[in-house]
Amino acid sequence: MKRFEIVNKRQLNDTINWYTIYAPLVARHAKPGQFIILRVDEYGERIPITMAGHDAEKGTVDIIVQSVGRTSILLSQLNVGDCLADLVGPLGQPSHMEGLKKVAIVGGGVGNALAYPLAIGMHKAGIHVDMICGFKTKDIVILEDEFRAGVDRVFMMTDDGTYGEKGFTTDKLKALLDSGEKYDEIVAVGPAIMMKFVCGIAQDYGIPSVASLATYMIDGTGMCGGCRAIIGGEPKFVCVDGPDFDGSLIDWDLLIKRGKTFAEQEAHDREHICKLTGGVRSNA
């Protein structure tokens, strides 16, 4: 088996794939909540991806990736037997689990893929886990069976009501809290705007919250500053100090504003991927 070889690939929906990659050194040291940075080819950009799982004995790490930008689309074109140019990790701080007995994890969209290893890891550590999974519509639902097999309770929500319960994840979280559910911690993983409201609800009910941030990164060591976030009035680097932070201390408005910085360029790159030439930009 070759280094960074894709040993398994599974399509979860039209835009999201699950990859198992041979990276024994990373697998040996990985913990829930940490991430890797990879390049598809030697000319490609470096993208950070939270690990969805790892197997130290087999030497593999799992990642779940949505094809939204140039590199993730190029990654989706690779198949079993292909190799990545490079992969580094594990990076970031492992998720905190000590002292927790019962938690609610709220995932939004592809954020559910990032929440998956944390939910499974917490449950294996003896923590009661309630998982609230939110999606826009039925066609993009992922990982329901995996969550149901690995945590205590799963609540499926869709914005349009085409699957599970109709409504937002915040609606379900409030309903659970209003019914008397008590949690030691509420974890939010997904779009920044969703995490902002989830953490706001937690604060309203006097419950500690944690948000797993996904920001722009290049080097993974804090040198580039692209992942900077303001936490409790002080700058922190998501790649080194995170990705998990106290949800009540995050400057959400600034985080959301920074998240839009490269959105236009990302959309431009998507339009210029030429499938016939393996991702080389067209001259248009």
Image (spheres, grey):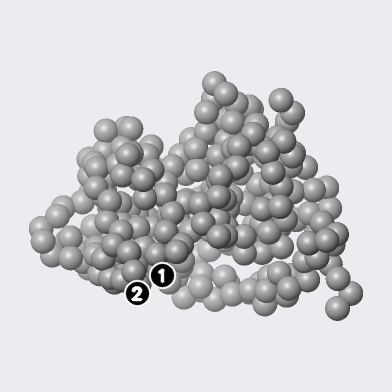
From the viewer's perspective, is 212 left or right of 238?
Answer: left
- On-image quarter of the N terminus: top right
Task: Count the numbered circles shown.
Answer: 2
* Local crowd size for mark 1, using a 10 Å CA cut-off: few (<14), some (14–19), many (≥20): some
| In-front residue for pair 94/78 | 78
| Any part of residue 236 in sight | no
Under mark 1, the amino acid is Lys
| In-front residue for pair 71/156 | 156
Label 1 close to label 2 by CB (< 8 Å)? yes
- On-image quarter of the C terminus: bottom right
- Name the spot of residue 13 as percent of width and height, x first: 51, 57
Element carrying mark 1: loop
Residue position marked by numbered label 2 in the rendering: 160
- Name the spot of residue 224 as percent of width and height, x first: 70, 57
Under mark 2, the amino acid is Asp
Residue position marked by numbered label 1 in the rendering: 136
What is the quadrant of residue 36 in the picture?
top right
Q: Residue at x 74, y 28 (%)?
A: 2
Q: Which mark is residue 82?
A: none
- Name the spot of residue 105 as percent of width and height, x first: 32, 53
- Name the spot of residue 155 as percent of width and height, x first: 27, 56
For marks 1 and 2 on the same chain, the one whose residue lies earlier in the sequence: 1
What is the quadrant of residue 5 in the picture?
top right
Q: Residue furthest top?
A: 57
Relative to 218, residue 89 above or below: above
